[in-house]
Image: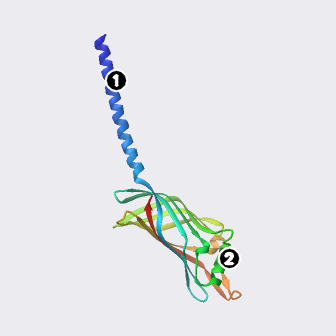
Amino acid sequence: MLTVKFYHTHKGVQMKTVGLLLAVALFAVFAQSISAQSKYDSRNIKMKVAGTSTLHDWECPVNKAYVKADLTINNNEIQSINSVWMDAEVKSIKSGKDGMDEKIYDTFDADKNPKITFQFTKTKSIEKNGDVWNITVSGNMTMGGTTMPVDLVVKAKMLPNGDVEISGTKKLKMTTFKMDPPSAMLGVVKSGDDVTISFTVDLKKL
């Protein structure tokens, strides 16, 4: 009886040991995956909106914008984009001319629609070329109170301090977002329908 009892106990210890080792291995893999997925916040951001008019081309900086993201990065290699959120304050768009600024704010109906936003929905592609990643993402952009699906093509690279620099441009039509291009001088001067939003943002790890 003693021999049989010892044999079963020893076997049980072996099984428990194997189970413990498997649990530790699985936890290590899970922990590595979690540690690679990190949240990032905008450290520096430059954004501008540009367009045309019947008189001349125009370009306006956006002085208040914010980006946050959730990225998976391993050994300085960008592996996946998990989420991105961007917003920009309409009334921080400044042309340097009060009259034009007011026309822009009226076009957005800025009191009711104070922000331009982009909400990531999925990653379409990530391709590395040298030290730059070419990334295409899909998401929903809201301007002037109208939300539309858009694709953004951006370039990303790792900076020496661990930040991630992301830059891109997106051409949009105001009428797609049910916005009338602004005009002045009783319609003599009118902005074109196309506008281009361009940005460069440094994301820091939180």
Which of the two residues, 42 or 133, is positioned nearer the viewer here? 42
**Looking at the image, which residue sits at the far left?**
3
Which secondary structure, mark 1? helix
Work out which quarter of the rendered image holds the N terminus and state it.
top left
Q: Residue placed at 64% from the left, 74% from the top?
A: 175
Element type at mark 2: helix
The quadrant in which the C terminus is found is bottom left
Tell me which colouring the rendered structure shows.
Answer: rainbow
Residue 107 location (% of width, % of height): 66, 76
Residue 65 appears in which quarter of the rendering?
A: bottom right
Please, is residue 83 above or below residue 114 in the view? Answer: above
Residue 84, percent from left and from top = 51, 60
> Hey, which quadrant is residue 18 in on the image?
top left
Q: Where is residue 27 in the image (x, y as percent from the top left)?
A: 39, 41
Residue ID at (61%, 68%): 115
In this figure, which residue is indicated by the disc labeled 2?
106
| Circle nearer the N terminus (1, 2) | 1
Query: Dot 2, how many residues are within 10 Å of its Cα: few (below 14), some (14-19), or many (20+)?
Result: some
Q: Which amino acid type is marked by label 2?
A: Asp
Separation of marks 1 and 2 at Cα, in angstroms: 76 Å
Q: Quadrant of residue 102?
A: bottom right
User: In the displayed structure, does residue 110 sit left or right of residue 88?
Assistant: right
* Residue 109 position within the rendered picture, expressed as x and y whole percent measured from the top left: 68, 72
Number of labelled discs?
Answer: 2
Q: Mark 1 points at which residue?
A: 12
Q: Residues within 10 Å of mark 1 (few under 14, many from 20)?
A: few
Q: Is residue 176 above or below residue 85?
A: below
Name the side, left or right, on which 6 lies relative to 124: left
Residue 117 circle label = none
Mark 1 touches mark 2? (CB < 8 Å): no
Q: Which amino acid does label 1 sit on?
A: Gly
Residue furthest right as drawn? 186
